[in-house]
Image (tube, rainbow, N blue to C red):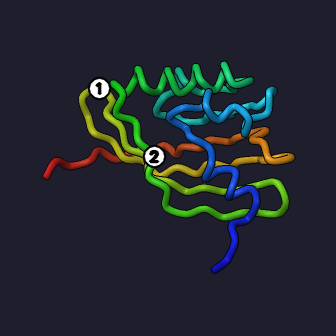
C-alpha cells in the first residue's frame, strides 16, 4: 500500500462543505482565484478564509444549493502543487449543468496557500433520464 503525497493528504482532510472546521489547513492569507466565463459575476480573487467562504456562499446561492464536486483525478506536482480534475454539477436558471474543472492547489507547510479554480466555457446541460 502506498502512502499519499503529503499535499494530497492535506486535501483529503479538507472539508469544502465546512471550511470553517478546516481552518487549520488554510493559510490566513489564502487566495482563491476563480475563472469561469459562464459565471462572470463570480470571477476574481477571494482572499482569506472569509473571502473563500463568501465565494462558496455565492455559488450555493446561485445554484440553489445544488453545487456538487465529483473528483476524477488528483495529481501531486513537485513540492507545493496538487492538480485536481473534477466534474462539477449544479443547477443554474433551472438547467442541470455538468462541467469539467481543473483546480490547482498550492500547499505550503501543510496549509492551502493559493488555489486556481479554472472552469472552461463548455458547460453542458445534463439530460434528464
> Residue 66: which quarter of the image?
top left
Secondary structure beneath disc 1? loop
Q: Which residue is mark 1?
A: 93
The quarter in which the N terminus is drawn is bottom right
Q: Residues within 10 Å of mark 1 (few under 14, many from 20)?
A: few
Q: Residue at x 27, y 39 (%)?
A: 96
Percent of width and height locating residue 80:
82, 54
Q: In the figure, is residue 90 to the left or right of 82? A: left
Q: Which residue is mark 2?
A: 69
Q: In the figure, is residue 27 to the left or right of 67? A: right
Secondary structure beneath disc 2? strand
Q: Earlier in the sequence, mark 1 or mark 2?
A: 2
Answer above or below: position of 28 versus 5. above
- Nearest to the observer: residue 94 or residue 111: 111
Q: Residue at x 43, y 46 (%)?
A: 88
Picture mark count: 2
- Nearest to the observer: residue 122 or residue 82: 82
Q: In the figure, is residue 118 to the left or right of 88? A: right
Answer above or below: position of 90 versus 101. above
Amino acid at each position: 500500500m502506498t502512502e499519499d503525497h503529503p499535499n494530497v493528504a492535506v486535501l483529503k482532510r479538507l472539508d469544502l462543505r465546512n471550511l470553517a472546521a478546516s481552518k487549520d489547513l488554510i493559510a490566513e492569507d489564502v487566495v482563491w482565484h476563480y475563472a469561469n466565463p459562464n459565471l462572470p459575476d463570480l470571477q476574481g480573487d477571494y482572499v482569506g478564509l472569509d473571502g473563500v467562504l463568501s465565494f462558496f456562499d455565492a455559488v450555493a446561492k446561485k445554484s440553489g444549493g445544488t453545487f456538487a464536486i465529483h473528483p476524477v483525478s488528483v495529481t501531486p506536482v513537485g513540492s507545493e502543487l496538487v492538480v485536481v480534475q473534477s466534474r462539477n454539477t449544479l443547477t443554474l436558471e433551472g438547467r442541470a449543468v455538468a462541467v469539467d474543472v481543473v483546480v490547482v492547489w498550492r500547499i505550503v507547510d501543510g496549509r492551502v496557500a493559493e488555489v486556481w479554480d479554472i472552469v472552461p466555457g463548455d458547460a453542458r446541460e445534463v439530460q434528464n433520464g
